[in-house]
Image: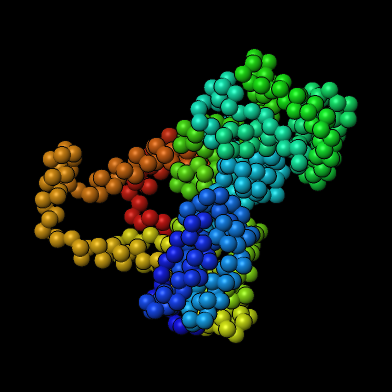
């Protein structure tokens, strides 16, 4: 394989697949490209044009041709002595919609879900309305209004024996211990009998497996057309455009492990970490070993088989412990590299991180990575494209038009304050509340108030000298 000397980034999506790239490998080689640099290839939200909204990290996106197409691309690259660098997303997954089975399981079971530890969720909210619940800000209007309009209907998935609420493209599973109240409203004796078994899940210490068996039994009963019609008729009692249905559906939704809310509530009330302020991207706890292993299993398999020759880590600044993650990743990649097949042999598998560095800041040497993706270099190149003599003219125009000082850092601090009190207000409040709990647990700091913490924290972040420590 050629040494890494020149990369070409390819943005894969359903209209430019892995097989499309395979057809162009010879052309890329003639340009002197040593490695293709691929956008994320794991299964993303259907129709994704970028791949950063992963819903299933365990397989290659079928919209791109799946793993067979990836192998065809790598074979073509090997014939030209070229390699493949893969962009991976460790910080977050796509949530909402109906495609992420891990997220749907958390909605269905709350803290009992084995995937509850995968996402960065604050289950113990200071807001009593959110205690033990996940805020789900995906409604297009206020909750009460959406109920009145009938835009959160209760649905039946007969094939899987599942009940769920629906709001346009979003699916909100009903937890199985709640199924009994729905089944009892049917005119079917067998369904009413099954309702008692679903009710028993409320007191069962480990209901997860039992619920799976009960849903399989429900699905079997629903193979009978008459039984299915009787259950669907029972769902009519939850028609929220009627007074009784409004009350009944609201009661059912209130007993779930989530609280449905308007998308507008996210900035203030969110109790889980997002990718910045994007509700559809939920933060992962990749610092936990089980999450690290589950989300990287396919990537490690590809490296071990010699299909991937380098990694680019997206948004490393979003992780709880970037250094720890990079060092763990380096150790694993080095072990895998030792056992790669001969045709993919290389002395070192490079790892690059998307790290935002301030002026004069250096990437720590002990992270075990090969460098950043080069934002700081891009800034230096951009400086060459600007005439320093134009600064005075632009600053004067800014001051005259905006009636604000010419000092750029003044604008930066104002912008940071707007973000912290606007789109990221909920995240800011979570940190403030956590610091309050720290203060309360020490006699010498218990008199520090939440208001004082908020003010100090705001000033600290507004004046923070780097993007991320």
Question: Horizontal and vertical percent for residue 294?
Answer: 65, 59
Question: Horizontal and vertical percent for residue 67?
Answer: 61, 65
The image quadrant that residue 370 belongs to is bottom left
The image quadrant that residue 131 belongs to is top right
| Residue drawn at (72%, 25%) of the image | 235
| Residue drawn at (51%, 76%) of the image | 77
Is 192 placed above or below 459 here? Answer: above
Q: Quadrant of the C terminus?
A: bottom left
Is 399 placed above or below 469 here? Answer: above
Furthest residue to the top?
A: 243
Question: Horizontal and vertical percent for residue 331?
Answer: 58, 73
The image quadrant that residue 467 belongs to is bottom left
**Number of residue marks:** 0
Question: Horizontal and vertical percent for residue 361?
Answer: 34, 64
Furthest residue to the front?
A: 23
Image side of residue 198 versus residue 23, left or right = right
Does residue 368 appear in the picture of this structure?
no
């Amino acid at each position: 394989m050629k040494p890494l000397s020149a990369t070409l980034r390819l943005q894969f999506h359903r209209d430019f697949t892995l097989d499309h790239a395979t057809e162009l490998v010879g052309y890329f080689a003639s340009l002197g490209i040593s490695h293709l640099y691929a956008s994320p290839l794991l299964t993303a939200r259907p129709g994704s044009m970028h791949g950063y909204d992963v819903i299933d990290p365990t397989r290659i996106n079928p919209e791109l041709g799946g793993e067979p197409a990836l192998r065809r691309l790598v074979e073509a690259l090997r014939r030209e002595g070229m390699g493949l660098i893969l962009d991976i997303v460790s910080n977050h997954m796509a949530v909402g919609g109906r495609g992420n089975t891990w997220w749907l399981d958390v909605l269905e079971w709350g803290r009992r879900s084995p995937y509850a530890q995968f996402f960065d969720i604050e289950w113990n909210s200071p807001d009593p309305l959110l205690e033990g619940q996940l805020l789900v800000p995906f409604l297009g209007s206020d909750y009460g209004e959406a109920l009145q309009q009938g835009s959160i209907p209760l649905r039946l998935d007969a094939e899987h024996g599942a009940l769920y609420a629906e709001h346009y493209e979003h699916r909100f599973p009903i937890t199985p211990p709640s199924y009994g109240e729905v089944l009892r409203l049917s005119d079917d004796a067998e369904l009413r009998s099954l309702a008692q078994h679903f009710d028993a899940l409320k007191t069962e210490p480990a209901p997860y497996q039992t619920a799976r068996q009960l849903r399989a039994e429900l699905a079997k009963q629903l193979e009978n057309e008459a039984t299915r019609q009787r259950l669907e008729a029972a769902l009519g009692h939850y028609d929220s455009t009627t007074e009784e249905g409004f009350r009944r559906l609201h009661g059912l939704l209130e007993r779930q492990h989530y609280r449905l809310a308007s998308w507008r509530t996210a900035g203030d009330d969110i109790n889980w970490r997002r990718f910045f302020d994007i509700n559809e991207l939920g933060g992962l706890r990749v610092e936990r070993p089980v999450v690290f292993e589950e989300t990287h299993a396919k990537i490690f398999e590809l490296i071990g088989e010699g299909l991937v020759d380098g990694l680019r880590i997206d948004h490393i600044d979003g992780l709880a412990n970037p250094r720890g993650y990079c060092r763990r990743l380096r150790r694993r990649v080095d072990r895998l590299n030792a056992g790669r097949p001969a045709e993919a042999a290389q002395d070192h598998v490079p790892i690059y991180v998307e790290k935002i560095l301030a002026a004069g800041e250096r990437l720590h040497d002990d992270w075990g990575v090969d460098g950043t993706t080069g934002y700081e270099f891009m800034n230096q190149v951009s400086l060459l494209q600007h005439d320093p003599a134009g600064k005075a003219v632009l600053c004067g125009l800014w001051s005259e038009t905006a009636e604000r000082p010419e000092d750029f850092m003044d604008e930066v601090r104002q912008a940071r304050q707007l973000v912290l009190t606007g789109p990221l207000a909920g995240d800011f409040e979570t940190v403030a509340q956590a610091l309050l709990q720290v203060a309360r647990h020490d006699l010498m700091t218990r008199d520090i108030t939440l208001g004082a913490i908020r003010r100090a924290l705001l000033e600290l972040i507004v004046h923070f000298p780097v993007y991320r420590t």
